[in-house]
Amino acid sequence: MTNDRDRAPSVPPSIQPGASRPRPEADRERPIVVGGATPRPPAPPRVTARAGGSAQPVPERAPSRPAAIPPRRTATARTSGYAPAGPAAPAQPIAQAAAPARRPTPPVAAAGSRRSRRRRVAAVLVVLLVLALAWPVGLAVWADGRLHHVQALSGAAGTPGATYLLAGSDERPADEADGTQGARSDTIMLLHVPPHGPAALISLPRDSYVTIPGHGEDKLNAAYAIGGPGLLVATVERLTGLTVDHYVEVGFGGVEGVVDSLGGVELCSDLNLPTPAKSGLVWSPGCHLTTGAVALQFSRERYADPQGDIGRAERQRQVIQKVASSAASPRTLVDPARQVRLVRAGTDALSVDESANVLTLARVALAFRAATGPGGITGTPPIKSLDYRPGHVGSTVLLDPDTTPTFFAQIAAGELPPGVVGGVPG
């Protein structure tokens, strides 16, 4: 039996002989703080188990000295460089860059001068805009007031599309070959724009043998000589089956003034007339810039033309086409004086139906341009004979009675393809 005094007292493992006694926390070396860095807290001591059940602490290694930390670069208002090692110096404020100098505020008088200059420029632009808009309107109103209106429309029921009758009248004494007295219509053209299909400009030979309402059979231009524009419109409507919506008449005496107001027009023909023809025309084959007087002779001549009235109709269409093109050219559009001369000469030469105005003339010009362009139809109705003599009116042009009604029905419906139709019979 063992005595209690012989029993070895229980000693804590931490103070057994030979064991390393941990130093108090306060006695441990602390890492040197450089540059104000915060040290890491020490790690807890590691403990290992020994045989016999008592745990022994593992001796701690001496803490390694932290690597030298390069001193922090500091800046002052005057110099910059590395601060000496040692206790951190109090932070010095970094000098701010000087603010850029502001532009001097312009004087109030200069700013006011610029605003005043802008207002003047804006006012000039407004005036120019008003003039640009007001000038064509004023020109159109002035032209509309100068138009001469005549009683021409028959009042018949309308037909589809738009139909215009263009006539060229002449106040010359009758000659032996013509037979009509007083005013005559040497140019008669039917301009039709169908609801669908190509526009058509058909020249009706003035000597066409037709029925004149209330006056029997005669030449087409006799209708104008007998009853003026009204009877001519009624005769054309009976011939074509189309109701004329508007009538435009050009006095041949006015053609000269219109062409001269444009500075002349270029006309082309293969005629060779070295000596004056009956109309007074002298011509060499080719294209020539013509005056108003020569353009009028060019439109009238038919006796020296191998195609007679058919060739004259072609040259008349050319004159109208060239006048219309020149009137719509940039040279005319930017020249107010030229516009005034053209309007004055044009309105002196024109007579229109009772309901027409300058807008009607604009539509006629557009339709004429479409018909004479590559997508339009130009020519004459089918002709059977250029020298038909019925016995009481001399030589006439006989339209083909079998194909003419169908021809005008196709024109009205827009069923004919673009191109040239009719002409001298083969």
Image (cartoon, rainbow, N blue to C red):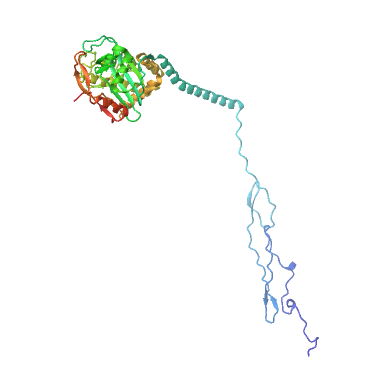
Where's residue 81, x and y in %?
Answer: 63, 51
**Count of all numbered marks drawn on residues in the image:** 0
Instruction: Tell me if I can see residue 253 in this picture.
Output: no
Looking at the picture, tell me which residue is in the foreground, 306 or 380: 380
Residue 99 visible in this rendered orientation of the protein: yes
Left or right, 239 with reference to 47: left
Q: Position of residue 311 (x, y in %)?
A: 23, 20
Q: Which quadrant would residue 50 be assigned to in this image?
A: bottom right
Quarter containing the C terminus: top left
Q: Nearer the viewer, residue 89 or 377?
A: 377
Q: State whether residue 152 is above or below residue 199.
A: above
Front one among 374 and 355: 355
Residue 331 against residue 11 in the figure, above or below: above
Instruction: Report whether 426 appears left or right of 225.
Output: left
Relative to the observer, which residue lies in front, 166 or 74?
166
Horizontal and vertical percent position of residue 121: 52, 24
Quarter of the rendering containing residue 211: top left
Q: Quadrant of residue 344?
A: top left
